[in-house]
Amino acid sequence: MVQGRGAAPEVPAGTARWAPLAVLFGVAGLAHLRRPELFDAIVPRSLPGPPRAWTTASGVAELALAAGLGVPATRRAAGWAGAGFLLAVWPANGRMALDARHARGRAGALRRAVTLVRLPVQVPLVRAALRVARGGPA
């Protein structure tokens, strides 16, 4: 199909199923690696080793998931792994929401809102990752 001036580029079939998850994992992975101090505090204390190791590992895992979703041969496996990853980090996100209750001021209010929205948003993200894993539509 020929595109006119200003027309949006065509999106390959099936892209809608995995591209948003790949972007999400990629952005989150970069955030973990660029600003690890923001994530160190939410690493559950029950995990062995230093929090920074877990922050770094989760950032690398998110980047690997983003890459895996972008490659057709690994997309389904990355969907399964992505769903498992999202479920595994749910407790850390819950902790972040609990900790945000004590944040003060305008920045604190924003932090509370973001962390509270984050928990229920993970449900459709897990479902989307499972749809990618099963090869179905998003």
Image: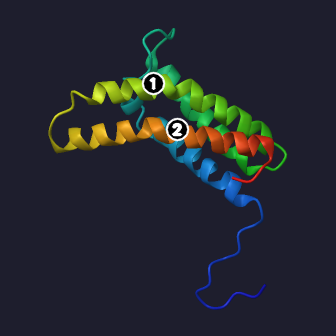
The answer to whether residue 73 of the structure is visible from this angle is: yes
138 versus 25 height, above or below? below
87 versus 138 height, above or below? above
Task: Name the residue: 51% across, 8% down.
Answer: 48
| Mark 2 vs 1: CB contact within 8 A | no
Whole-percent x, y for residue 81 in the image = 70, 32
Task: Name the residue: 37% across, 28% down.
Answer: 96
Label 2 Cα crowd, 10 Å radius (few <14 / some 14-19 / many 20+): some
Of residues 74 and 36, the one nearer the viewer is 74
Among the two numbered marks 2 and 1 on one chain, the one whose residue lies closer to the N terminus: 1
Of residues 17 and 66, the one nearer the viewer is 17
Quadrant (top left, top right, bottom left, bottom right) of the N terminus? bottom right
Task: Name the residue: 61% across, 40% down.
Answer: 63
Residue for badge 1: 92
96 versus 18 height, above or below? above
Type of the residue with mark 2? Gln
Which is more foreground, mark 2 or mark 1? 2
| Quadrant of the image occupied by residue 41 | top left
Q: Which mark is residue 122?
A: 2
124 horizontally vs 69: left or right: left
137 horizontally vs 118: left or right: right
Kindly report the distance in space between the C-alpha atoms of the residues bearing marks 2 and 1: 12 Å
Of residues 115 and 124, the one nearer the viewer is 124
Q: How many marks do you count on the picture?
A: 2
Whole-percent x, y for residue 35 in the image = 40, 37
